């Protein structure tokens, strides 16, 4: 009797997790795309939708919140979102440099190196946006084991044009944006584990079973993203993204570009996630022929092969999905001249070898036969001072200031805690077809107080990459432009004037000697009594 | 408070003050009386110290200062398959040497080789314009973006087309090593920094053009396009020079332009790696240690052949001789501001770099050892979390395992400079006094008490103006000569213009000198004031140079120390003319005596920006000329 009641109790506990909870939909997808340089790009997306849910009204922050009952939506994240009344949240943690020229645009735009966090919040008198931003940073940094807590006022800005609300705009309060990035943040297993814990099936079933840290973190590029948006007609959507670019040519013995799920991840999908409403693997087929893909699937749609893995479908889980080039002995890299895959390619460097000044130069190339207008955003920590009067726009070494418009520049502003906010430079560039536009401006490097230097002072300071973004289009001229998303340039490392911290003993001796000399002689002069002394010969 | 003040300001006994002032006076008088002894002692100690620099007693063992480096602590993966790749590359390079490929064709070939590996490769064309015409070439380079790395830092492996070995030796094996390393290194995901492979044209100017383009510091006489591919900040670099068919030792060349040196940690780590990973002993330059070169001692010994064998074979003297060769070679590079290899161009961009020179021999090492050593060295450089900053930047390598700290060699030049300063100040004091005969006291204006001595010392004015005019004029003359030497005319007719300039600069001062109004008889003579200012100026120059470039300061101390201190006005016209001619020879003699050096110094200045040529023309020669004019003045 006693045993039976325990069984019944356990069964009751299990029912909600196996039955699809009303109002919560979970779906997962894996996109695999072979790239032209032999690499394979993989994008996992895990989407949970809370149907009919509405972000918390920040004006009601003082009052008791409605109770939170989720079956699939992660409670830890839900609590953070409710606690700080976040309408939209984007967090990305990436390692490596996304190679737009060879890999094209990523499936998820946030590929800036390091950590990037931005959130839209409604304004309220109860708790200010900045207070909630600070709380959000610290909460997320605890949740994801990342140093997001250091994204303080020295790194926070509000670039609303480049990072607009991607969902609907709630009407209950005017909304504000907070954006910060930390280029030196490195991403590793300790970030992946909490990421997997947010999934309903963790890494036990479904596509997430493939996420083997040893393989994912050996990829040429990897990154994860958490995106929370609100859409009026559906509700709150949580999108967990994990992207990785594998290099089978490097890891295979015969330098071939053949890949299969087993070789990429060293894992296989044993069972599907029972709560997933849809679960699929999509392979984007390359344009050139000569490949073979197994298992054969007749469902070729627009160069895509889709394998449905969900338990509801009658398709059995394929043990392995593989693609191979039977006629190729070893992979031959395409030889130059190579045209970049993306219409825009961007380079950004800091020139100059001194520790006091330099030149920031950006070159943007339009590879397409059409004119492209792009927004250019620079969010520069106050370590560098940009000199706007030296801003030069050149095309073929001719000054073309007419190609730059809508220039907005906010110099670093002092904050209440005696720190400087970053400076923000935003402009619209018009790049003629098949040309390279060069922007250069002189910069001064800051002279820091010695307490402001990090422990690895001789490394230099990481500067976040610039962002190029499509301009908000009015509806009538969408036909002329192509569809693209934000482009991040690689981050930079800059040397600031650094004292020699490695020789504290010498520094102490030298400065003490100097102090003693100055003090001694002045003290001597102050306390001396001046008299005339007669000396007889 | 008052008590404290009273305590601090308690009056000294008057006689104590008097005694103190007397003591001070006596000391000054003592120094002045023994000035000659003092300066001679300083000179002797200084020069003797310079001679003692190579003795093992003053050196100490090298050690690794930066903990992150962890040299020779990794398993290397370079294997015989990679050696085979290198051999195939070498076969291809031999082919292009036989077919006499042009610079463009070579660069195109290297670019294709890099592209086949999937690296972002490109070619840089450049042209330098100099007074001797234009120099152009083509560099090929490739950037390997390391997996997962942000690409903010980079390491460089380079090889130049020509080898350090000279005589037109081609660095074919060095280039094959770089090409095969590129194929090998890209298969590993452990790199935290980007790796840049460069095959630079010619010997020095190719890399110079590439570095300037990379850092955006393109000088006005260089024409080149911006680089197509870039990476992050370059911290460390290895240049590979392997021209012979096999090698017995790996020599390290480390001197950079204008006397800069790389951080010593790089050399020390390389020494450990070379020894423990590759089993190849490291040497300084291509000098083999006495213990290594038993069979080659005749051509490597510093002793002339008439020295008895028991002296030649004494281990201490052999060790000293080995030290002398290293130090002299080091001073030869550093004093002239020359770099000892392609790596030396990088130091000015804060890149710590060395050249690995495969010392030609019949064996036993080749690509296998070199590949393993370079791989392991790259792993060590890859470990760096910060720039190399812990170890020394000022040092002299006396042998692979020993070095001298700055405190052990700097005093030698400083002592000479102090001696010159004392001499100059002594001259200044002497100029301020005149010895008067007793007639002056005879004239006697109501001096009741008879003076104890009949002769007296009297103060006199020291008008510096005419001496200063001479100083400024000589330096202006130096600037003029420098501009002439760097002009197109000089490049076209050096054999005619060099003697002409030499005669002109030697003859002009005696002609112009009478135009200068001499000082009034009651004032100090210009020659004394000139000598004093000359000595003080030269001493300051030596002290300052000793911190920037010790070798140059030591050479200045040797060439200017005693000659400037012993310049004096001779009573006989003949002697003073002869002395003048001698000083002129010391100042400008290089124009006629070493035309080859002049040419290379000008090339170094125009293309590489080495400060040696302007320094000699504008600072050194005018200083010696001032001493020459001192000799001329009394006559």
Image (spheres, helix red, strand yellow):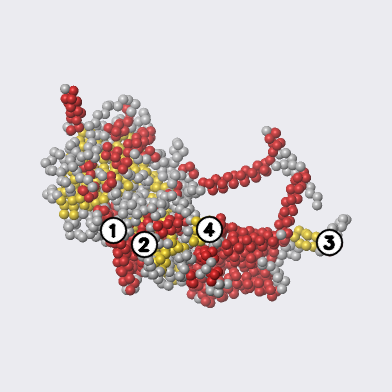
Of the 4 image quadrants, the one containing the N terminus of chain B is: top right
| Location of mark 3 (residue) | B454
At 65% from the left and 64% from the top, the residue drawn is: B565
Q: In which quarter of the image is residue B563?
A: bottom right
| Location of mark 1 (residue) | B118
Q: What element carries label 3?
A: loop
Q: Position of residue B558 (x, y in %)?
A: 59, 65
Chain at numbered mark 4:
B
Q: Do labels 2 and 1 share a chain?
A: yes
Q: Which of marks 2 and 4 is nearer the N terminus?
A: 4
Nearest-to-viewer mark from 3 and 4: 4
Q: Which of marks 3 and 4 is nearer the N terminus?
A: 4
| Location of mark 4 (residue) | B59
Estimate how packed mark 4 is, as few (under 14), some (14 to 19) or many (20 or more) residues with alpha carbons within 10 Å. Answer: many
Instruction: Find the distance from the CA under tag 3 to the CA under tag 1.
Output: 96 Å
At 48% from the left and 49% from the top, the residue drawn is: A497
Q: Which of marks 3 and 1 is nearer the N terminus?
A: 1
Chain at numbered mark 2:
B
Label disc, if present, on residue B242 of the rendered structure: none
Asked if residue B356 can be seen in this view, the reply is no
Instruction: Find the distance from the CA under tag 2 to the CA under tag 1.
Output: 26 Å
- Front-most of residues A84 and A174: A84
Q: Do labels 2 and 3 share a chain?
A: yes
| Location of mark 2 (residue) | B369
Chain at numbered mark 3:
B
Q: Is mark 4 on a helix, strand or loop?
A: loop
Residue at the far front: name it: B310
Instruction: Find the distance from the CA under tag 2 to the CA under tag 3.
Output: 86 Å
Of the 4 image quadrants, the one containing the C terminus of chain B is: bottom right
């Amino acid at each position: 009797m006693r045993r039976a009641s325990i069984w019944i109790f356990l069964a009751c506990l299990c029912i909600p997790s196996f039955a699809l909870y009303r109002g919560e939909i979970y779906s997962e997808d894996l996109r695999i795309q072979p790239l032209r340089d032999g690499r394979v790009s993989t994008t996992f997306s895990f989407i949970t939708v809370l149907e009919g849910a509405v972000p918390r009204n920040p004006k009601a922050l003082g009052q008791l919140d409605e109770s939170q009952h989720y079956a699939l939506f992660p409670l830890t994240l839900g609590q953070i979102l409710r606690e700080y009344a976040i309408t939209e949240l984007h967090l990305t943690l990436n390692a490596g440099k996304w190679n737009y020229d060879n890999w094209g645009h990523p499936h998820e735009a946030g590929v800036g190196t390091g950590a990037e966090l931005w959130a839209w919040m409604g304004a309220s008198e109860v708790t200010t946006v900045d207070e909630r931003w600070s709380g959000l940073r610290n909460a997320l940094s605890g949740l994801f084991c990342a140093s997001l807590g250091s994204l303080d006022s020295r790194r926070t800005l509000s670039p609303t044009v480049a990072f607009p609300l991607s969902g609907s705009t709630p009407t209950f309060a005017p909304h504000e944006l907070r954006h910060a990035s930390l280029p030196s943040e490195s991403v590793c297993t300790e970030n992946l584990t909490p990421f997997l814990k947010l999934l309903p099936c963790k890494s036990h079933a479904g596509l997430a079973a493939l996420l083997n840290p040893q393989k994912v973190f050996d990829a040429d590029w990897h990154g994860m993203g958490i995106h929370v948006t609100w859409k009026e007609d559906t509700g709150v959507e949580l999108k967990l993204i994990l992207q990785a670019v594998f290099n089978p040519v490097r890891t295979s013995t015969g330098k071939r570009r053949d890949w299969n799920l087993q070789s990429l991840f060293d894992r296989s999908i044993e069972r599907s996630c029972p709560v997933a409403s849809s679960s699929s693997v999509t392979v984007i087929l390359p344009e050139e022929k000569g490949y073979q893909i197994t298992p054969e699937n007749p469902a070729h749609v627009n160069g895509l092969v889709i394998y449905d893995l969900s338990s509801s479908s009658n398709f059995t889980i394929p043990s392995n999905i593989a693609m191979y080039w039977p006629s190729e002995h070893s992979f031959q890299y395409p030889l130059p001249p190579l045209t970049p895959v993306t219409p825009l390619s961007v380079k950004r460097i800091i020139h100059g070898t001194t520790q006091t000044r330099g030149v920031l130069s950006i070159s943007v190339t339009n590879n397409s036969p059409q004119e492209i207008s792009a927004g250019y955003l620079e969010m520069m920590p106050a370590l560098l001072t940009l000199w706007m009067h030296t801003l030069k726009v050149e095309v073929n070494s001719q000054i073309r200031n007419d190609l730059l418009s809508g220039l907005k520049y906010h110099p670093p502003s002092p904050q209440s805690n005696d720190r400087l906010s970053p400076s923000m430079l935003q402009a619209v560039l018009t790049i003629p077809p098949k040309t390279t536009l060069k922007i250069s401006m002189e910069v001064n490097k800051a002279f820091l107080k010695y307490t402001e230097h990090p422990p690895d002072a001789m490394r230099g300071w990481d500067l976040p990459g610039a962002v190029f973004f499509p301009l908000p289009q009015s509806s009538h001229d969408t036909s002329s432009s192509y569809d693209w998303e934000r482009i991040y340039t690689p981050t930079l490392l800059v040397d600031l004037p650094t004292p020699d911290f490695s020789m504290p003993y010498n520094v102490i001796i030298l400065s003490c000697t100097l102090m003693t000399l100055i003090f001694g002689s002045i003290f001597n002069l102050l306390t001396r009594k001046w008299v005339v002394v007669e000396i007889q010969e | 408070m008052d008590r404290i003040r009273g305590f601090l300001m308690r009056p000294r006994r008057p006689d104590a003050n008097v005694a103190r002032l007397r003591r001070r006076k006596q000391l000054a008088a003592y120094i002045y009386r023994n000035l000659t002894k003092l300066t001679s002692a300083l000179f002797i100690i200084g020069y003797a110290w310079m001679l003692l620099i190579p003795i093992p007693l003053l050196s100490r063992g090298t050690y690794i200062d930066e903990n992150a480096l962890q040299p020779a602590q990794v398993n290397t993966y370079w294997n015989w398959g990679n050696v085979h790749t290198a051999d195939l590359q070498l076969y291809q390079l031999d082919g292009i040497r036989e077919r006499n490929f042009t610079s463009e064709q070579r660069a195109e070939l290297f670019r294709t080789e890099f592209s086949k590996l999937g690296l972002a490769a490109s070619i840089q064309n450049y042209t330098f314009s100099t007074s001797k015409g234009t120099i152009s070439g083509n560099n090929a380079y490739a950037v390997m973006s390391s997996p997962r790395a942000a690409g903010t830092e980079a390491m460089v492996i380079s090889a130049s087309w020509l080898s350090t070995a000279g005589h037109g030796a081609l660095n074919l094996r060095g280039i094959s090593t770089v090409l095969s390393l590129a194929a090998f290194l890209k298969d590993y995901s452990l790199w935290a920094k980007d790796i840049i492979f460069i095959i630079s044209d010619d010997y020095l100017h190719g890399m110079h053009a590439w570095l300037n383009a990379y850092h955006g510091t393109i000088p006005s006489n260089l024409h080149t396009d911006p680089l197509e591919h870039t990476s992050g900040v370059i911290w460390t670099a290895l240049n590979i020079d392997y021209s012979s068919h096999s090698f017995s030792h790996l020599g390290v060349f480390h001197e950079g332009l204008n006397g800069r040196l790389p951080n010593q940690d790089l050399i020390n780590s390389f020494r450990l790696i070379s020894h423990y990973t590759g089993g190849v002993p490291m040497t300084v330059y291509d000098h083999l240690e006495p213990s290594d070169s038993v069979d080659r001692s005749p051509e490597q010994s510093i002793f002339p052949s008439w020295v008895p064998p028991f002296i030649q074979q004494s281990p201490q003297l052999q060790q000293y001789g080995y030290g002398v060769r290293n130090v002299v070679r080091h001073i030869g590079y550093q004093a002239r501001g020359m770099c000892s290899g392609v790596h030396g161009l990088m130091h000015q961009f804060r890149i710590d770099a060395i050249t690995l020179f495969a010392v030609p021999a019949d064996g036993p090492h080749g690509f296998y050892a070199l590949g393993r050593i370079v791989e392991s060295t790259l792993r060590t450089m890859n470990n760096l979390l910060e720039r190399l900053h812990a170890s020394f930047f000022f040092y002299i390598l006396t042998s692979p395992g020993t070095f001298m700290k700055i405190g052990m060699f700097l005093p030698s030049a400083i002592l000479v400079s102090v001696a010159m300063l004392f001499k100059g100040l002594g001259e200044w004091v002497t100029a301020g006094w005149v010895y008067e005969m007793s007639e002056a006291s005879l004239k006697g204006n109501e001096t009741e008490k008879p003076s104890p001595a009949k002769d007296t010392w009297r103060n006199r004015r020291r008008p510096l103006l005419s001496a200063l005019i001479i100083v400024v004029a000589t330096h202006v003359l130096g600037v003029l000569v420098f501009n002439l030497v760097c002009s197109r005319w000089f490049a076209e007719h050096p054999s005619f213009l060099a003697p002409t300039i030499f005669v002109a600069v030697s003859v002009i001062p005696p002609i112009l000198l009478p135009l200068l109004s001499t000082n009034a008889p009651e004032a100090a003579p210009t020659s004394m004031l000139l000598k004093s200012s000359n000595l003080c100026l030269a001493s300051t120059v030596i002290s300052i140079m000793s911190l920037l470039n010790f070798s140059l300061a030591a050479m200045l101390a040797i060439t200017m120390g005693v000659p400037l201190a012993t310049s004096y006005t001779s009573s006989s016209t003949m002697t003073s003319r002869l002395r003048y001619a001698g000083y002129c020879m010391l100042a400008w003699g290089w124009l006629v005596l070493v035309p080859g050096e002049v040419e290379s110094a000008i090339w170094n200045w125009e293309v590489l920006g080495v400060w040696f040529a302007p320094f000699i023309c504008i600072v050194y020669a005018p200083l010696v000329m001032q001493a020459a004019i001192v000799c001329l003045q009394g006559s």
